[in-house]
Image (cartoon, grey):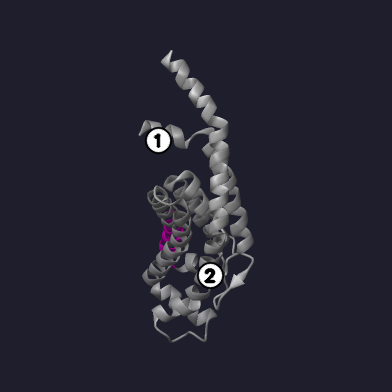
Amino acid sequence: MEKEKRNFFSARNIAILAVLVALVIVLQLWGSMIPVGAAGLNLSFVLIPITLGAMLLGPVAGLILGFIFGFVVLMTGVTGANGFTAFLLADSPFLTVLTCLVKGMAAGAVAGLFYNLIAKKNKYVAVFVAAAVVPIINTGLFILGCLCMSGTIQSFAGNYMPNLDGHNIMYIIVVGLVTVNFFIEFAINLVCAPALFTVSSVVERQILKKYLPKKVEENKKEEV
């Protein structure tokens, strides 16, 4: 366990994680300016760096990046930049915070676990699975969170989606809040999967090329 902690908090991992955290923040803020769907929700371009982090650094990094994603979403709600999140925070603050944080964290962590498991047999397949898992879990837990806030969602529909007002809660969530966003995010992640695989492979080779000789030299000194 101590060895795993030391490996995760290496200079290489911290540097990569810092870049990915910056990407999560920038992409989420940028994506929040592009409304999509009947409710004017926003695309989650941050799913790409979350997926990349889960592959390069493992489930812990995926969880951290997912947390940052959820935190930024909440901040856009607090500031009023994201009207939907602001509405949920005002009506159901606890469940909104829980949903925003848990869905991103779970998506990143599970993607890392799947990638590590499948990459032992086929890294290319592992990339596509990880890229698919992130939007599926992110959206799945969003739906679950909305179901737990059914009254708030119906109230939102009544105020901002009159064409869906009067329908049952599942119809409002799937048709009004999820469908368009999910398929766009899913497609973006899958299209980027080959690029993510290439980037991860190149980075891995460069890290090995740079640090492996030093490690061999250290081992020789220890043996002496």
Label 2 – label 1 distance at C-alpha: 40 Å
Circle 1 sits in a helix, a strand or a loop, which is it?
Answer: helix
Vertical arrangement, residue 11 with respect to residue 46, above or below:
above
Q: Answer above or below: position of 185 versus 220.
A: below
The residue pinned by badge 2 equals: 84
134 falls in the magenta region = no
Image x and y of residue 216, in percent? 49, 24
Residue 100 falls inside the magenta stretch: yes
Q: Nearer the viewer, residue 221 or 91?
A: 221
Q: Nearer the viewer, residue 140 or 85?
A: 140
- Spot the residue most to the front: 121
Q: Is residue 10 visible?
A: yes
The kind of residue on which mark 2 rests is Phe
The residue at 39%/52% (across/down) is 118
**Residue 86 visible in image:** no
Q: How many marks?
A: 2
Name the quarter where the C terminus is drawn. Answer: top left
Q: Which residue is mark 1?
A: 4
> Crowding near pointer 2: few (<14 within 10 Å), some, many (20+)?
some
Q: Position of residue 160 (x, y in %)?
A: 54, 79
The N terminus lies in quadrant: top left
Residue placed farthest to the top in the image?
224
**Residue 41 appears at what percent x and percent y?**
55, 70
Q: Amino acid at mark 1?
A: Glu
Q: Which residues are magenta?
A: 92-105
Which of pointers 2 and 1 indicates the residue nearer the eye?
1
**Dot 2 or dot 1, earlier in sequence:** 1
Give the prevailing secondary structure in the magenta stretch.
helix
